[in-house]
Image: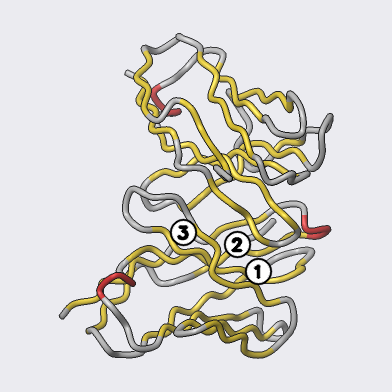
Amino acid sequence: GQSLEQPSEVTAVEGAIVQINCTYQTSGFYGLSWYQQHDGGAPTFLSYNALDGLEETGRFSSFLSRSDSYGYLLLQELQMKDSASYFCAVMNSGYSTLTFGKGTMLLVSP
Amino acid sequence: NAGVTQTPKFQVLKTGQSMTLQCAQDMNHNSMYWYRQDPGMGLRLIYYSASEGTTDKGEVPNGYNVSRLNKREFSLRLESAAPSQTSVYFCASSRIYEQYFGPGTRLTVT
């Protein structure tokens, strides 16, 4: 089976940098994804790491270490609109399905 | 392009009633998914369809059935609704590792 651990809540102020960690235990791993979900909305794709290292997309970066079964999402220059839930998800063998963590609620204050 | 659409947006059922949640995508994706989201539980996979004509169980399939009507449409049926099926239901489709989600159906079973 699959299991993922991420913090339930993180708080930060506008303009700051925040890191959301995710550790996983899985059989059959293709990669680690991150999704953002605003309250009442649908999840939207942020990033995908199949190989070790850092992927950067604008203010957001995602990191993966396959040997440590660990990844993180880094959000820079935080804005109020970044207040949302962030989910890590493991891509299972064959790109068939995702297993999601329980999510981290990020609260950005002025 | 509308992306992934779901109907209805809201539904209230009495215990024992049946209903079908509809989902359609216009992105020509092969894979489609049904998830449920409960507070503090993240997204849990109910059923998925890797291609037209195939369906497979996910993590929480009990009490549900699905039909992949054609490449565009994937429906979820509750034959005899129970209060434990009160949840937000999301449909998604995917191209390789990125999943695209519909707006969700908020279902309450009383």
Check the picture and name the quadrant holding the C terminus of chain B: top left
Q: Tell me where residue A108 appears, x and y as whole percent.
A: 24, 76
Tell if the residue under mark 1 belongs to the same chain as the one under mark 3. Answer: yes
Q: Which residue lies under the disc numbered 3?
A: A102
Q: Which residue lies under the disc numbered 1?
A: A25
User: Amino acid type of disc 1?
Assistant: Gln
Left or right: residue A68 compared with residue A77? right
Whether the residues at callouts 2 and 1 have beta carbons within 8 Å, the answer is yes
Total numbered badges shown on the rendered structure: 3
Residue B46: quadrant of the picture? top right
Tell if the residue under mark 2 belongs to the same chain as the one under mark 3. Answer: yes
Chain under disc 1: A
Q: Nearer the viewer, mark 2 or mark 3?
A: 3
Crowd class of label 2 (few under 14; some 14 to 19; many from 20; radius 10 Å): some
Q: Is residue B50 above or below residue A25?
A: above
Chain under disc 2: A
| Residue appearing at x 63%, y 26% in the figure | B75
Q: Tell me where residue B101 appears, x and y as whole percent.
A: 54, 48
SS for callout 1: strand
Crowd class of label 3 (few under 14; some 14 to 19; many from 20; radius 10 Å): many
Real-space CA distance between mark 2 and mark 3, rounded to the nearest whole angstrom = 10 Å
Real-space CA distance between mark 1 and mark 3, rounded to the nearest whole angstrom = 14 Å
Crowd class of label 1 (few under 14; some 14 to 19; many from 20; radius 10 Å): some
Left or right: residue A21 compared with residue A99? left
| Residue appearing at x 61%, y 71% in the figure | A24
| Residue appearing at x 53%, y 84% in the figure | A61
Sequence-earlier tag: 1 or 3:
1
Q: Which residue lies under the disc numbered 2?
A: A3
SS for callout 3: loop
| Residue appearing at x 71%, y 62% in the figure | B97
Chain under disc 3: A
User: Amino acid type of disc 2?
Assistant: Ser
